[in-house]
Image: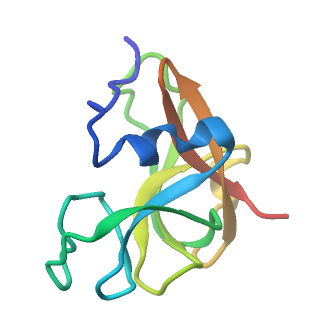
Amino acid sequence: MARKLPALNPDNSAFWQGGAEGTLNMHHCQGCQRYFHPPAPICPRCLSQDVGPRPVSGRGKVLSYTINHQRWNADVEMPYVVAIIELADQPGLRLVSNIVGMPVDEVHIDMPVRVTFSQVEDVWLPFFEREA
């Protein structure tokens, strides 16, 4: 069973395909000058429609995490970490992803991380690894 991929649309394609250029794109509002996630056609803070994707640093920290031991998908190596990442570009800018490239028991709160991408078909999944 392969990973279930997101349905691409005009609002989210820059997020899911930015990895082709090694870029993490987050939606940004011109009205209130804030990033937000998930991408949407209207800013959830000020309701402006003047929104669109903008590259961010791809750096952040682990805000919270869990180690999953349940085999939900035969193609995913067990165990794995599901984490809430707070991006360095703006306080409160968060996304859920996996921590990769390290033993799961070494992940910790406030650990600095950076984005890395894994291509599956026409989608580049953003994962995070420990920042050296």
Q: Position of residue 27 (x, y in %)?
A: 38, 64
Q: In this view, does 104 lie above or below 111?
A: above
> Which residue reaches farthest top?
1
Q: Position of residue 29 (x, y in %)?
A: 33, 76
Task: Give the colour scheme shown.
Answer: rainbow
| Quadrant assignment for the C terminus | bottom right
Q: Is residue 68 visible?
A: no
Q: Which residue is drawn at 53% across and 31% down?
A: 78
Q: Position of residue 100 (x, y in %)?
A: 64, 45
Q: In which quadrant of the rendered view does residue 2 lie?
A: top left
Is residue 101 left or right of 82 when viewed as pictured?
Answer: right
Q: Is residue 38 above or below residue 30?
A: above
Quadrant placement of the N terminus:
top left
Q: Which of 64 and 45 is in front in this view?
A: 45
Residue in the picture at 60% in, 73% down: 61
Residue 18 x/y as whole percent: 54, 44
Front residue of this view, candidates 62 and 24: 24
The vertical placement of 28 against 21, above or below, is below
